[in-house]
Image (tube, grey):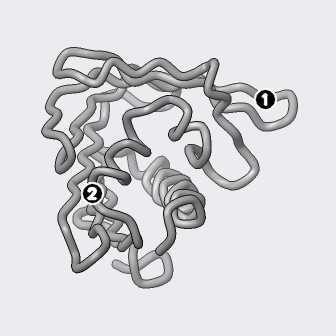
Amino acid sequence: MRICAKETEMTDSRTVEIVRRFEAPPSEVFAAWTQPGRVASWYGPEGWEAPADRITIEARAGGRWQLTMIAGEREMTIGYEILEIDEPHLLVMRSDPMPGMDDPTVVRVELSEDGAGTLLTLTDGPLPAAGRDPAAAGWAGALDKLGRVLGG
């Protein structure tokens, strides 16, 4: 089922998959996911920001990837355990418990060369039925911002 302009697709009823192309090499896209200052430039849906001083990333298997997003008076902290990392091609993370979610999700970010750019494939799941569409919209918005930062 397609839910968002030609790049977001539900691969099953509980998983979101988004494929995007960026006009930057995999090393730059990977750095945008693993360096706090760079994550701060794009992470979060439209209307939210993630200040660099509220981001902690230990870029290693077993490390933490955590940040606090802010929108006006609202704050939301999210965290992940890094399960797998293969610079500059793969980042796999398992979420901490989140409100309304019985189980953690696994976010997988795969990066591959595509000419002079990078093809990013992001999957996130399993998600509860009520959380699937908001997660897809949140990731799509964040990747829109990443596209403006990187190009593509």
Q: Position of residue 76 (x, y in %)?
A: 64, 27
Viewer-side residue, 9 vs 99: 9
Outermost residue on the bottom side: it is 6
- Of the 4 image quadrants, the one containing the N terminus is bottom left
Label 2: state its secondary structure.
Answer: helix
> Callout 2, which amino acid?
Pro
Cα distance in 3D space between marks 1 and 2: 33 Å
Left or right? Give the position of 127 relative to 147: left
Relative to 67, residue 42 above or below = below
Relative to 80, residue 133 above or below = below
User: Which residue sits at x=51%, y=39%?
Assistant: 39
Circle 1/circle 2 CB separation < 8 Å:
no
Relative to 150, residue 90 above or below = above
Viewer-side residue, 133 vs 144: 144
Q: Position of residue 24 (x, y in %)?
A: 38, 65
Which numbered tag is attached to residue 149?
none
Q: Position of residue 41 (x, y in %)?
A: 61, 45
- Tag nearer the camera, 1 or 2: 2
Q: Is residue 39 visible?
A: yes
User: Which residue sits at x=61%, y=27%?
Assistant: 52
Q: Quadrant of residue 2?
A: bottom left
User: Which residue sits at x=32%, y=70%?
Assistant: 19
Q: Position of residue 113 (x, y in %)?
A: 19, 68
For label 2, the crowd category at 10 Å Cα-Cα, with few meaning under 14, some 14 to 19 and many 20 or more, is many
> Callout 1, which amino acid?
Arg
Label 1: state its secondary structure.
Answer: strand
For label 1, the crowd category at 10 Å Cα-Cα, with few meaning under 14, some 14 to 19 and many 20 or more, is few
Query: Mark 1 = which residue?
Result: 74
Left or right? Give the position of 99 relative to 110: right
Which numbered tag is attached to residue 26?
2
